[in-house]
Image (cartoon, helix red, strand yellow):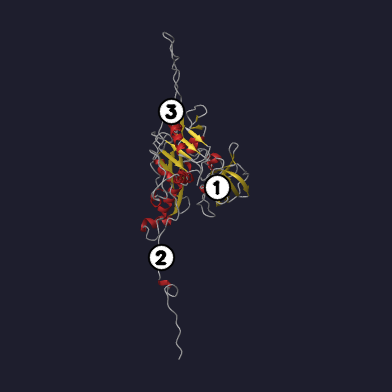
């Protein structure tokens, strides 16, 4: 007599409809923080109301002179007094938008998040703030011109990039932060950067802005959805993220970035005042000789800041590779009795100095500053504010709303002499 055959009834196949689909939630799988935002908040506040007509401050950058030793009963000195020099500050608005369907708005308003892993609206708002803060962190180092990079070579719609912020050699393949690291690429969808190429002569817009659909960090290349007509080597690359896509002034960020640390360190003119005309309107020290960053170089920076700017250095912002090399120097010279009691990642210290680093600090650079009177912060609000659900605008003819996240700020410079910098430094 043969036994009837049967199989095992399982919850994973034969009775799978009785099982529940389980989703554990949304997990942050990458680092999106911007350390520079915290550093900026620690800068001295630029205490002035914001005016769209004009914001100025006066710079005391002229040395008084004309004191004379005179003979008994002789003629007294020629009268003279130096004047102040006017610096002009421009505020800048950074804007991020997102949309949400009317259907999802109704669901979230009536039943909350019971049917979703996380509120779509809160997710979009948080990611919008991340986008604004990333721009804030990048521009903390850059130039008001808005230059992101230069084109090295062109192959169809593929562009090999070089010279981060327009500085020769910066952001190369040997660096921790490469040129393409500042771009977001997407083969589909709208979550991608749009860029424009500018003829350096003028500058002039080469073509309409194009979407970055791919990037290759190993080659420092970006690919756009359509080739940029006329783009050639040494063209300037700038962001072109708004919906106007035909003009240099309206559709790109040319001359629409705040003046960052590199501007303060290297530019001849800043806030309409020329360092060539007024010698004290320059950084205290701009050392491009390279080599290892040492305690002697830190002492030179401190002295230069005191001598030219009259301040006291209290902050060092250095590239991660420079920091690692300094630690290696200190470990090499360390003498200790118990090797097992030594901290493996001990941090360099200097009295009165706060050391800061992040992945955004340009490779090979160290900035030394008095953050109480050098670069300052001018912000309409203390931080980026996200909109509420009822603050959107109805989309024309579409069932949905559009929301804006805006932040008005800039970095006014009041004393460039309280900044010193080193570039081309050894890294590990």
Residue corresponding to mark 1: 174
Mark 3 to mark 1 CA distance (whole Å): 42 Å
The quadrant holding residue 22 is bottom left
Picture residue at 59% right of the left edge, 47% below the top:
160
Dot 3 or dot 1: first in sequence order is 3
Q: Position of residue 195 (x, y in %)?
A: 55, 46
Identified at 58% across, 37% down, the residue is: 203
Side (left or right) of 194 relative to 401: right
Asked if residue 263 shows in the view, the reply is yes
Q: Tell which of 176 and 140 is nearer to you.
A: 176
Residue named by callout 2: 22
Asked if one can make out residue 414 in the rendered structure from this viewpoint, the answer is no
Q: Which residue is mark 3?
A: 58
Q: Residues within 10 Å of mark 3 (few under 14, many from 20)?
A: few
Point out the residue furthest to the front here. Answer: 337
In the image shown, does 92 or 33 lie closer to the viewer?
A: 33
Foreground disc of the pair 3, 1: 1
The CA distance from mark 2 to mark 1 is 44 Å
Q: Quadrant of the N terminus?
A: bottom left
Q: Position of residue 67 (x, y in %)?
A: 43, 17
- Sooner in the amino-acid sequence: mark 2 or mark 1: 2
């Amino acid at each position: 007599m043969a036994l009837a055959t049967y199989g095992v009834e399982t919850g994973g196949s034969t009775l799978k409809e009785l099982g529940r689909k389980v989703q554990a939630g949304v997990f942050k799988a990458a680092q999106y923080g911007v350390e520079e935002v915290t550093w900026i908040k620690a800068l001295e506040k630029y205490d002035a109301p914001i005016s769209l007509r004009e914001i100025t401050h006066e710079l005391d950058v002229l040395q008084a002179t004309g004191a004379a030793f005179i003979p008994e009963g002789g003629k007294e000195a020629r009268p003279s007094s130096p004047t102040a020099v006017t610096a002009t500050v421009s505020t800048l608005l950074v804007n991020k938008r997102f949309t949400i369907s009317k259907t999802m708005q109704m669901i979230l308003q009536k039943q909350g998040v019971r049917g979703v892993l996380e509120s779509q609206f809160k997710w979009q708002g948080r990611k919008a703030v991340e986008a604004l803060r990333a721009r804030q962190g990048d521009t903390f180092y850059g130039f008001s011109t808005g230059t992101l990079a230069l084109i090295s070579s062109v192959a169809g719609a593929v562009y090999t990039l070089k010279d981060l912020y327009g500085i020769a050699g910066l952001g190369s393949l040997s660096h921790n932060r490469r040129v393409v690291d500042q771009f977001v690429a997407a083969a589909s969808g709208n979550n991608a950067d749009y860029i424009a190429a500018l003829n350096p002569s003028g500058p002039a817009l080469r073509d309409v802005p194009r979407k970055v659909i791919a990037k290759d960090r190993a080659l420092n290349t970006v690919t756009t959805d359509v080739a940029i007509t006329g783009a050639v080597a040494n063209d300037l690359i700038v962001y072109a993220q708004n919906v106007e896509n035909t003009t240099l002034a309206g559709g790109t960020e040319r001359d629409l970035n705040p003046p960052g640390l590199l501007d303060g360190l290297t530019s001849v003119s800043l806030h309409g005042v020329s360092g060539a005309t007024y010698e004290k309107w320059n950084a205290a020290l701009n050392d491009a000789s390279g080599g290892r960053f040492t305690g002697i170089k830190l002492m030179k920076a401190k002295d230069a800041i005191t001598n030219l700017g009259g301040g006291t250095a209290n902050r060092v912002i250095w590239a991660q590779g420079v920091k690692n090399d300094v630690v290696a120097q200190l470990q090499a010279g360390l003498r200790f009795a118990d090797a097992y009691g030594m901290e493996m990642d001990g941090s360099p210290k200097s009295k009165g100095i706060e050391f800061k680093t992040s992945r955004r600090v340009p490779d090979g650079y160290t900035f030394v500053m008095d953050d109480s009177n050098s670069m300052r912060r001018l912000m309409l609000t203390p931080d980026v504010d996200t909109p509420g659900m009822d603050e959107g605008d109805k989309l024309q003819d579409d069932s949905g709303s559009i929301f804006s996240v805006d932040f008005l700020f800039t970095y006014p410079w009041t004393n460039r002499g309280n900044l010193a910098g080193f570039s081309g430094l050894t890294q590990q």
